[in-house]
Amino acid sequence: MKLWNTRKGLFLTVGQKVYPVPEPGLDALIRIDELQEYLESILRQGSVDEQLEMEDLLAPIENQEVWAAGVTYYRSRDARMEESREAGGGSFYDRVYTAERPELFFKATASRVVGPGQPVRIRRDANWSVPEPEWTLLINPRGQIIGCTIGNDMSSRDIEGENPLYLPQAKVYQGSCALGPSILLTPEPLPASTRIDLGVERGGEIVFAGSTSLAELRRSPASLVEYLFRENLFPNGVFLMTGTGIVPADDFTLLHGDVVRIRIEGLGELANPVQCG
Ligand code: DO4
Ligand code: MG
């Protein structure tokens, strides 16, 4: 069952059937105990004759923070070691890839997050920007994973590579995060075989395509959530991006006007134009 945040309110869908959700937003829904039972009761009320239009879709977030895990795939470790070699940061990435404690960082407030079809941004003071396609967990205030969605952890590789202490500037800025198009509400993890695909289009042509699968993710969702909740409270729940396994070659940078498409099996497609300025 999928949850959609739209200009007309929240809706559940099962296949083509659409069900209105009485709660005004995700904050209220996420606090409900026995959520699956509650959702089943909404389905029993019956479906409505409503089409969810692309232009009505909003990012599936209300007052949740967005956090992110890093260097959870070998490809990310490799790319980061390379980009920070001159700055002497290379060994940090190697060490965190194998360390017991994961890299977790604050990524975005809801105001910095865009939804399906809305522009993600590249920084005007960056000259090497990439999308990071990430399986993104939704966790309730009790630390239980209740669903997942597609996330784009937009990153400025030149700023991050110049000095690892610049990470917050490389990662956290207006329009630096996209979520959507909907939330798959399920406590079950996606299968390890789940494929993640990234495509970047420029002027109608594909200028980058890459893929990975959740089998390449080095850490379990439960262990990432356990670290995130160790010394933090999330009264409205929290999104946790699980890291990227796809990093374009070093000569690739996003440009204004590109379109980023991320597909995750079972979750659909999140597509966003890229804006600079
Ligand atoms: O260590 C820097 C960020 C890593 C990251 O965002 C990722 O691996 O996805
Ligand atoms: Mg990332």
Image: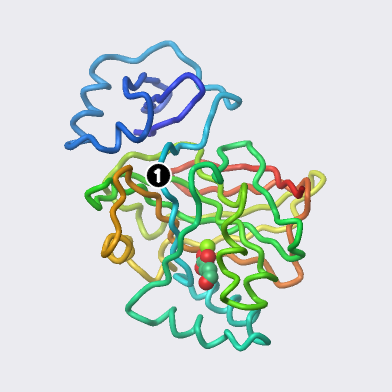
The image position of residue 85, as x and y in percent, is 64, 86
Q: Could you tell me which residue is drawn at 46 percent across and 48 percent down?
A: 265
Q: Is residue 25 left or right of residue 74?
A: left
How packed is label 1: few (under 14 Cα within 10 Å), some, or many (20 or more)?
Answer: many
Q: Is residue 158 above or below residue 40?
A: below
Q: Which residue is mark 1?
A: 64
The image position of residue 42, as x and y in percent, is 26, 21
Asked if ligand 2 lies within 8 A of label 1, the reply is no
Q: Could you tell me which residue is drawn at 56 percent across and 54 percent down?
A: 197
Q: Please name whichever residue, 185 or 175, is drawn nearer the observer in this view of the structure.
A: 175
Q: How is the image coloured?
A: rainbow
Q: Could you tell me which residue is drawn at 61 percent across and 54 percent down?
A: 173
Q: Secondary structure at mark 1?
A: loop
Q: Please name whichever residue, 248 or 22, is drawn nearer the observer in this view of the structure.
A: 22
Q: Is residue 222 above or below residue 15?
A: below
The image position of residue 79, as x and y in percent, is 60, 76
| Figure label count | 1
For this orientation, the residue located farthest to the top is 49
Residue type, label 1: Gln
Q: Please name whichever residue, 20 or 162, is drawn nearer the observer in this view of the structure.
A: 162
Q: Could you tell me which residue is drawn at 34 percent across and 35 percent down?
A: 27
The image position of residue 140, as x and y in percent, is 28, 46
Q: Is residue 34 above or below residue 276?
A: above
Q: Please name whichever residue, 122 or 219, is drawn nearer the observer in this view of the structure.
A: 122
| Quadrant of the rendering where the N terminus is positioned | top left
Q: Is residue 174 left or right of residue 213?
A: right
